[in-house]
Amino acid sequence: MPEATPVPLAQLTTLRTGGTPDRMIDATTSDELVAALREVWASGDPWFALGGGSNLFVGDEPFDGTVVRVLTKGIERMPSPVPGRVRLRVQAGHDWDDLVAYAVAEGLAGLEAMSGIPGTVGAAPVQNIGAYGQEIVQTLAEVELVDERTGEVSTVPAAELGLGFRTSVLKHHYGSVPERRAVILSVTLDLADIGQGARRIAGEQLRTALRLGVDEEVSLAWVRERILETRRGKGMVLDPEDPDTYSAGSFFQNAVVSASFARTLPDECPRWPVAPDLDPVLVIPLAAFDGYVAPPPTAVQSDVKVSAGWLIEHSGLRKGFKLPRSRAALSSKHALALTNRGSATAAELAELARFIQGRVQAEFGLILQPEPVLVNVEL
């Protein structure tokens, strides 16, 4: 078993909080990772798997259990069953942005708008990461995982992961447990092989972020550099010299609300439609079929995704806001990021998060939900 000397989780998480676990295991191969998880599960002790630590908010107290660090790396290029596409099988501990850089250099499209997102590849499907209208669900083919209940390793198609807006059946949402408790070992992505030439950008949200016209053509490398530049301007690319990046990225999720609720918000609040399923599969048992199939609804109102950052700022909490005597603050560049301005405790960050939730609820009637996984800490 690849045992490691436990260190404070504040050294391994981008929010820079977290006490020292009782035990730590560093798994550098899939076999080591599976063996470590099976051993920990058999013991019944508390545990969690740690990748890049960029989507974790860990409490100040020592963690009474085992942390399994996922340090596996590697990219394998494979043929795709679809002409004009390529598959990449990537180990769970591989750095996400390193994967995006590789794909762009190889002329493989589908990940470029997610440049600069911190963390590891194995964590990406868990919350269906995305940016500027591009999400991993659009290119994910399958994952290899080990199931906590059985200890078995299996390959699971993306369609069985329940991928939705920043969610999946694997995600530990605040206040709930995952529908399926498992750890991803590798991820297989199916990407378009378009080369290094310029092309038209299809997504409106991405075109808007890049300030491109409908018919303008740009290369994958151009898109990546502009996205990185945009994220740096918001403090969303890790930089040891910039305290604005001592965060878990967007601390609160952009809220998905009904169209009717969205109409109660100010017109200026940025919003994006969440497309409904206009062609659902209808299954009628043969014994119950009477020859009549009801027509689909003529008007389907889509849900609406609204900007949590806008709601925070317009509840009166500007960029850089902090509570008196606190070392936790909103980023000076992006109102959606809670930052550690220097040795802030988890308690200080939690206090700020609760204050923000209260202000937004009082102003707009909406309770923002945290995006990171919370360990040993409550809001």
Image (tube, grey):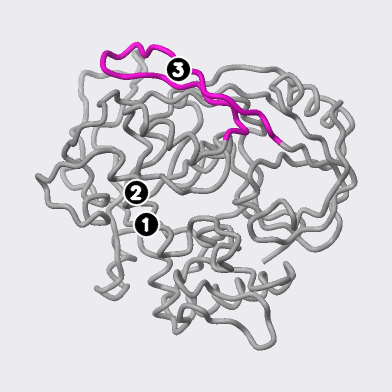
The amino acid type found where label 1 is placed reads Glu
CB atoms at circles 1 and 2 under 8 Å apart?
Answer: yes
Q: Amino acid at mark 2?
A: Glu
* Residue that lies at the very extreme toward the left in this rendered image: 215
User: Circle 2 sits in a helix, a strand or a loop, which is it?
Assistant: helix
Q: Position of residue 79 (x, y in %)?
A: 39, 11
The residue indicated by pointer 1 is 229
Numbered label attached to residue 244: none
Q: Position of residue 251 (x, y in %)?
A: 54, 62
Residue 211 placement, left or right of 2: left
Q: x and y percent of residue 207 in the render?
A: 22, 51
Spatial separation of the CA atoms under disc 1 and disc 3: 28 Å
Mark 1 packing: few (<14 Cα in 10 Å), some, or many (20+)?
some
**Crowd around label 2: few <14 · some 14–19 · many ≥20 (10 Å):** some
Task: Classify mark 1: helix, strand or loop.
Answer: helix
* Above or below, 216 relative to 208: above
Residue matched to label 2: 225
| Span of residues in magenta | 70-94
Mark closer to the chain start, 1 or 3: 3
- Image-based side of 197 in relation to 338, left or right: left
Tell me how far mark 1 sits from mark 2, CA to CA.
6 Å
The residue indicated by pointer 3 is 77
Residue 47 location (% of width, % of height): 79, 41
Viewer-nearest of discs 1 and 3: 1
